[in-house]
Amino acid sequence: EDRYLDIRQRKTRYATLRRIEAEAQAAFDDEEKARKEAQKKYDEAVEKEDEAVKKIEKEAADLEAEYKKKQDKGEVIDSGEVNAMQQMLVLRLVTAKAASEETKQNLKLELEKTNDKIRRDRLQSVARIQNLYKLFSLLIPPLVPLLVGGLVWVRRYIREREGISKTRMKT
């Protein structure tokens, strides 16, 4: 029997404020865009640091290949000069790697701080909108009874003054 299937598949519907949901979605979209931009900047900076290290590694490999060519040709190579150049390149490579790692660590911390700030901004934006609607829900409902009360008071005041002579009124 198919007639019971619709009853079982009903889902409870919760009343929500569509405006708050729309604003929250817009804030979430802004957060995602800012997060992707921050990640892109981080990736570019990391790539730049990696390129600097690769450049030094390539320089070391080129120097090694140059000395090998000279050795294959039978030229006399000063081993002290070769060792000094290799040590200098190794030292440059180690310092470049250490600086690169430190820079990457700093960039990662900066990225995390940026992401946290973006998330906090989004949450504050949503909370601000929710608080605005809470304020509206607090202030608007008493307006109608106050207006009705004011109209009743004005009407009674006018009726009360109708039968009094001008000399007896205080003003």
Image (cartoon, rainbow, N blue to C red):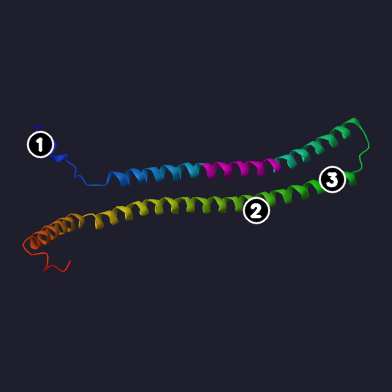
Q: Is residue 26 magenta?
A: no
Q: Identify the mark nearer the N-term, 2 or 3.
A: 3
Position of 129 with respect to 110 (left or right) is: left
Kind of residue at disc 1? Tyr
Span colored in magenta: 37-52
| Position of residue 44 measured from the top left corner of the image (x, y, whole percent) | 61, 41
Q: Label 1, label 3: how many angstroms apart (C-alpha)?
A: 85 Å
The numbered disc on residue 4 is 1
Task: State the residue position of label 3.
Answer: 85
Please state which amino acid type lies under the numbered disc 2: Glu
Q: State the residue in front, 117 or 40.
A: 117
Question: Label 2 near label 1: C-beta < 8 Å?
Answer: no
The quarter of the displayed image where residue 81 is located: top right
Closest to the camera, between mark 1 and mark 3, is 1
The N terminus lies in quadrant: top left
Left or right of residue 145, residue 113 in this image: right
